[in-house]
Image: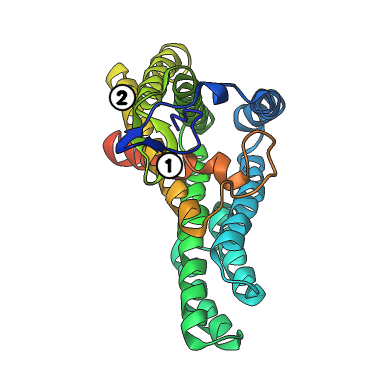
């Protein structure tokens, strides 16, 4: 979020140069082409198709993102048994609304399956323990957070609420990217991500609030004007944290992108990083603050 095109911070003498290089001020048109293909398809799934189709989409995206996370985070050779358990538990979490299982049932399964998989895996005890912690983290970081999108879809007017979430998250990311590319000069967190700028954050916030207000006026009557304004700001902040969190993970393991499945966007985890934080933020705002519940 808020990417300026710089790739590093160089120094001249003792003074750091924080202004992005003009030579790298360009847009990646592959981002546009990918969006042109994906956005209409996602819109149709959210707006017109049954809830289980959205769950299926989340499962596909979630599994791809989770595999990317495990690939870059786990020590090679990978513990495939542990990875299989993590992916399976995440799929169960995502699909729980279509299954005769509660979230507590799934956590119980995971609590039993992960230690067994750890004991049956190879490597030193310390490595197996670390791998198991990463697997469990991935289930929470990707599986559980994405499942709140499916939970939102089951609320009254859930298709419109999910569309609101998707539009505001997309607007925040897009506004930040283009504002940072055009005007980004002041780095936000260079130790975590050398491309994010304060100007990008401002652009993302402005576009997110504008889209939230427009959505309220056009199709989300369940939200008040104040809700739309608060959510525009809140989701921008949550998306920024999600973006920085994933950047910190990638910086820790020394990779630029989590993968290359989406041209111009990197991996699936790169594309979903903001949503992993905005989705639970939105769901719990809607259910806890606004009191919208799937039950009468």
Instruction: Decide if residue 218 is on the left or right side of residue 56.
Output: left
Which comes sooner in the sequence, label 1 or label 2? 1
Q: What is the residue that sits farthest to the front in this orientation?
A: 13
Name which quarter of the figure residue 113 lies in: bottom right
Q: Residue at x 51, y 53 (%)?
A: 142
Residue at image mark 2: 227
Q: Nearer the viewer, mark 1 or mark 2?
A: 1
Q: Position of residue 131 (x, y in %)?
A: 52, 74
Name which quarter of the figure residue 260 lies in: top right
Q: Position of residue 129 (x, y in %)?
A: 47, 80
Residue at image mark 1: 193
Of residue 203 and residue 17, the one placed in the foreground of this image is 17
Rounded to the nearest angstrom, the CA distance separating label 1 from label 2 is 31 Å
Q: Is residue 219 visible?
A: yes
Density class for disc 1 (Cα within 10 Å; few <14, some 14-19, many ≥20) is: many
Question: Quick check: 200 above or below 88?
Answer: above
Of residue 17 and residue 100, the one placed in the foreground of this image is 17
Q: Position of residue 219 (x, y in %)?
A: 48, 16
* On-image quarter of the N terminus: top left
Question: Quick check: 177 above or below 91?
Answer: above
Instruction: Decide if residue 197 is on the left or right side of residue 138.
Output: left
Q: Secondary structure at mark 2?
A: helix
Q: Residue at x 50, y 37 (%)?
A: 7
């Amino acid at each position: 979020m808020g990417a300026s095109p710089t790739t590093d911070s160089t120094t001249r003498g003792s003074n750091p140069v924080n202004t992005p290089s003009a030579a790298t001020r360009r847009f990646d048109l592959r981002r546009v082409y990918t969006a042109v293909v994906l956005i209409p398809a996602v819109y149709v799934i959210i707006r017109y198709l049954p809830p289980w189709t959205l769950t299926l989409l989340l499962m596909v995206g979630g599994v791809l993102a989770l595999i990317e996370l495990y690939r870059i985070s786990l020590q090679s050779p990978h513990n495939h048994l542990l990875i299989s358990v993590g992916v399976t538990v995440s799929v169960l979490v995502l699909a729980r609304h279509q299954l005769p299982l509660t979230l507590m049932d799934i956590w119980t399964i995971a609590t039993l399956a992960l230690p067994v998989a750890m004991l049956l895996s190879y490597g030193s005890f310390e490595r197996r323990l670390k791998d198991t912690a990463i697997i469990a983290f991935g289930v929470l970081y990707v599986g559980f957070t994405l499942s709140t999108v499916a939970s939102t879809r089951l609320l009254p007017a859930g298709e419109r609420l999910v569309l609101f979430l998707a539009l505001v998250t997309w607007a925040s990311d897009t506004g930040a990217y283009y504002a940072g590319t055009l005007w980004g000069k002041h780095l936000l967190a260079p130790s975590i991500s050398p491309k994010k700028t304060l100007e990008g954050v401002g652009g993302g916030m402005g576009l997110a609030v504008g889209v939230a207000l427009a959505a309220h006026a056009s199709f989300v009557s369940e939200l008040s004007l104040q809700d739309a304004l608060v959510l525009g700001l809140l989701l921008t902040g949550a998306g920024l944290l999600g973006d920085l969190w994933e950047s910190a993970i990638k910086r820790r393991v020394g990779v630029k992108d989590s993968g290359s499945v989406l041209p111009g966007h990197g991996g699936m985890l790169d594309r979903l990083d903001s949503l992993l934080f905005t989705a639970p933020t939105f769901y719990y705002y809607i259910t806890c603050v606004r009191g919208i519940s799937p039950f009468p």
